Amino acid sequence: MTPPHRLAVARLWYEANSFNPIPRTLRDFAAREWVTGPQARALYAGTATEMGAVVAFERGTPGWQVDYLRCTSAPPGGPVEQADLDRIHDEIVAGIAAGRFDAVYLSLHGAVIGTRDLHPDLTLLRRIRAAVGPDVPVAASFDMHACLAPALAPLLDVATIYRTYPHVDMAQTAARALDLLRRRAEGAIGTAVTLRPVPMLPPSHDMRSDSGPMAELLTLARQAETAPGIHHVDIAGGFSFADTPAAHASIAICHEPGTDTSDVAGHLAQEALKRHAAFQPALPGPDAGLDQALAALAGGAHQPVAVIDAADNPLSGGIGDTTGLFRAVRARAPDVPVVFAFFHDPDLVAHAHALGEGAAISARLGGRIAPQFGAPVAFDGVVARLTDGHFRNTGPMERGMPVALGRTAVLQSGALKVVISETCQSANDPGWCDLHGIDLSQTALFCVKAKNHFRAAFAPHCGAIVTVDAPGPAPADQTILPFRHVPHHFLVPQQVSP
């Protein structure tokens, strides 16, 4: 009997905001996702994730054996403490080096940053390539907001990138990578990767894949895949809050070796540059945004109307601590039911749990981490609900994955409910509302620290969505941030010749 092909699988999925002052540690990775072997298979089976696609591949592909090495992720935040990042790398590389594998698949985000290493994905892939040699094919899947150093290309045989934003095609992206990797390892096709950097770093506010400039570029990429010798074409927008030399948009082409991809890559790069200005959002401030939301309700929009504070979006590396939108809500004091999600404050959560449900509570909300984004706001109310912070995603993004927010509390003052939590994670799934006893049909204003991923599950339930720009670590205007490694002209649209 022919022995099975052996596939090594590892995952390091993390997005770092260079301007978030809170570094991530192993504790953050362990709290969200830290598995190997059978535990990994059990966690990911049936989920709408890259690793869910790996389990499906294992179960549906005779002749292949999958070894689950270290698989981990953490909620976006600041750069990762270097010693902790090195430990993750060491474990992944040691696992790969210890086996005789026929192929390697990596689930990577593409925007991880260490406190010292600005190119951790490149560091990891160089070490993996040294461990397996030149002949073992290596595939990786990346987020649409990956920052891809061109030097990654010769280290990879296959690269795929999410094609949807909100990212509801994680599993499909991995499945494309695994299919090409399998055919390459079995000798059915040849593969190589071309990465063409695009000298721009657009904000992601208007990067949704359903309409606008990214949708147009994705259509052009699908058309380009018809060229001879090309397997597929993907586009990365870069992560607009990563201050690294690799923070730029990229065209990624997987193709037969020897295929001339210069025309396709050059054309798409030029088309992306033409659209740089179209990615620049024009957002109202918190007061004007609340005016728009209340006008929508008065005009007959069904409840809830969502008001999104994108500058403190945790999935952009926000801190869950800014107070611009909350202060505007308190000043306006609208006479309608309002839910505010959320503030990240472990000490206040502990205090609320010590008091118990129904107890009176006085607190200062926000402004504890970075008061330059807004001073704390006084709050007097009651502890309306306490939770253990556990639920499972039921929406289209990462469906089936368990979520651990840490303990949470719902504080209430009149018609206003405020959720506080022990970790900094977005309210992007209906399971979050169920956990906190929130009925959106009875909520007029749903004020959320979030951005586009919120739309995947909640857009069908909202009468309108208004995105505002308040002070925070992920602002719409990138030029106000102190970039050191990204050229200014990457942030400001330039005139491009037709």
Image (cartoon, rainbow, N blue to C red):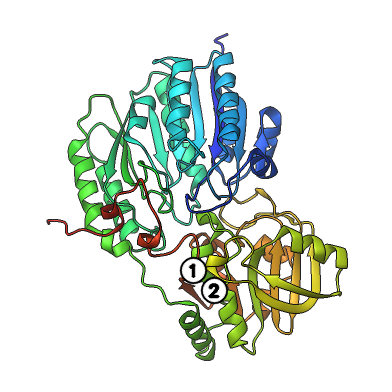
228 to the left or right of 222: left
Quarter of the rendering occupied by the N terminus:
top right
The image position of residue 71, as x and y in percent, is: 61, 34
Residue at the (65%, 49%) spot, across then down: 400
Query: Is residue 227 depicted above or below 343 in this figure?
Result: above
Q: Quadrant of the C terminus?
A: bottom left
The quarter of the picture where residue 152 lies is top left
Which of these two is toward me, 420 or 266? 420
Q: Is residue 123 visible?
A: yes
Q: Amino acid at mark 1?
A: Pro
Q: Earlier in the sequence, mark 1 or mark 2?
A: 2
Across and down, in percent, residue 17 comes to 49, 51
Q: Which residue is mark 1?
A: 471
Taking depth in this image into account, of 37 and 96 the one nearest to the observer is 96
- Which of 2/472 is in front? 472
Image coords of residue 242 (percent x, y) = 43, 48
456 with respect to 217 (left or right): right
- Residue at x-position 30% and y-position 47%: 222
Residue contact at pointers 1 and 2, CB within 8 angstroms? yes
Residue at image location 61% in from the left, 51% down from the top: 399
Residue at which label 2 appears: 324
The amino acid marked with disc number 2 is Gly
Please give left or right for residue 108 compared with residue 155 in the image. right
Residue 298: x and y in percent read 53, 91
Question: Which mark is drawn over residue 439?
Answer: none
Q: Nearer the viewer, residue 451 or 324?
A: 324
Q: Secondary structure beneath disc 2?
A: helix
What secondary structure is marked by label 1? loop
Give neighbour class at mark 2: few <14, some 14-19, many 20+ (Cα, 10 Å).
many
* Inter-mark Cα distance, 1 to 2: 6 Å
Q: Residues within 10 Å of mark 1 (few under 14, many from 20)?
A: many
